[in-house]
């Protein structure tokens, strides 16, 4: 009976995790997490007031939400891998059904938070990821804006369950930004939005 319970646990663990059950010394899942704040030259928060599908706390107006799920009509975006990656289609905006931005308010600024998990066997050489974004609300136009992120995948486990990947630098419209903290937080300045 004891061995049957152990077998049941070994079978069930992969079902509850999006990555395979592997040895403790190996990287398990790679977690790519990043938080974008967009501001103009004067420090105005360009994310504040973006349309949300759901928000929290629920009993306040959307504009006063502390977190929420950003409506796809307010920002279209996709993730494109520069290096080959199994099970990921790099066609523009192909993964919209899977990807959402979560709004998070911290220190009176609104952040667009993205987090997704990949199996290291599917994307073993991931070092450069393009975030392709289209949002009139943030950018003031209907163009696709490329945010190029450079990542350092861990060689060994750095968290109890997953491996958080460190973003070393971010490029946007000729400027290089260095993210901070475990959630790879970055503030991007949008030129020409001072009067809006």
Image (cartoon, rainbow, N blue to C red):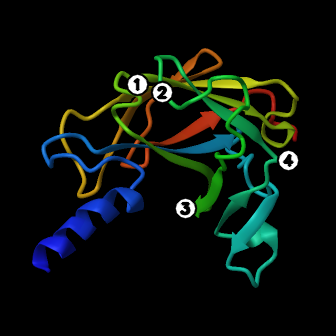
Q: Which of marks 1 and 4 is nearer the N terminus?
A: 4
Mark 4 or mark 2, earlier in chain: 4
Marks 1/3: CA–CA distance: 32 Å
Q: Which of 124 and 195 is in front in this view?
A: 124
Q: Characterize the local packing of mark 4: few (<14), some (14-19) or many (20 or more) Cα atoms within 10 angstroms.
A: some
Q: Which of marks 3 and 2 is nearer the N terminus?
A: 2
First in residue order: circle 1 vs circle 2: 2
Gap in Å between the C-alphas at discs 1 and 4? 29 Å
Residue 126 is marked as 1
Q: Which of 56 and 171 is in front in this view?
A: 56
Task: Tell me: residue 142, above or below residue 23.
Answer: above
Q: Using residue 72 as the reference point, say whether residue 168 is left or right of it.
A: left
Locate residue 156: give its quadrant. top left
What secondary structure is marked by label 3? loop
Q: Tell me the CA gap for discs 4 and 2.
A: 28 Å
Q: Name the residue under label 3.
A: 107
Q: Residue 73 carries which label?
A: 4
């Amino acid at each position: 009976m004891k061995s049957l319970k152990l077998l049941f646990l070994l079978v069930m663990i992969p079902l509850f995790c999006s990555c395979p059950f592997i040895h403790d010394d190996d990287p398990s899942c790679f977690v790519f997490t990043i938080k974008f704040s967009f501001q103009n030259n004067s420090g105005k928060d360009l994310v504040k007031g973006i349309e949300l599908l759901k928000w929290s706390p629920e009993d306040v107006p959307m504009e006063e939400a502390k977190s929420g799920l950003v409506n796809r009509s307010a920002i279209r975006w996709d993730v494109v891998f520069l290096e080959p990656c199994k099970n990921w289609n790099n066609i523009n905006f192909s993964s919209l059904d899977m990807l959402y931005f979560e709004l998070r308010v911290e220190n009176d600024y609104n952040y667009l938070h993205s987090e997704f998990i990949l199996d290291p066997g599917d994307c073993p050489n991931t070092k450069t990821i393009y975030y392709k974004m289209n949002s009139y609300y943030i950018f003031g136009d209907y163009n696709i804006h490329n945010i190029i992120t450079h990542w350092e995948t861990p060689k060994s486990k750095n968290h109890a369950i997953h491996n958080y990947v460190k973003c070393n630098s971010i490029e946007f419209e000729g400027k290089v930004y260095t993210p901070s903290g475990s959630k790879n937080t970055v503030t991007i300045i949008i030129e020409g939005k001072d009067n809006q």
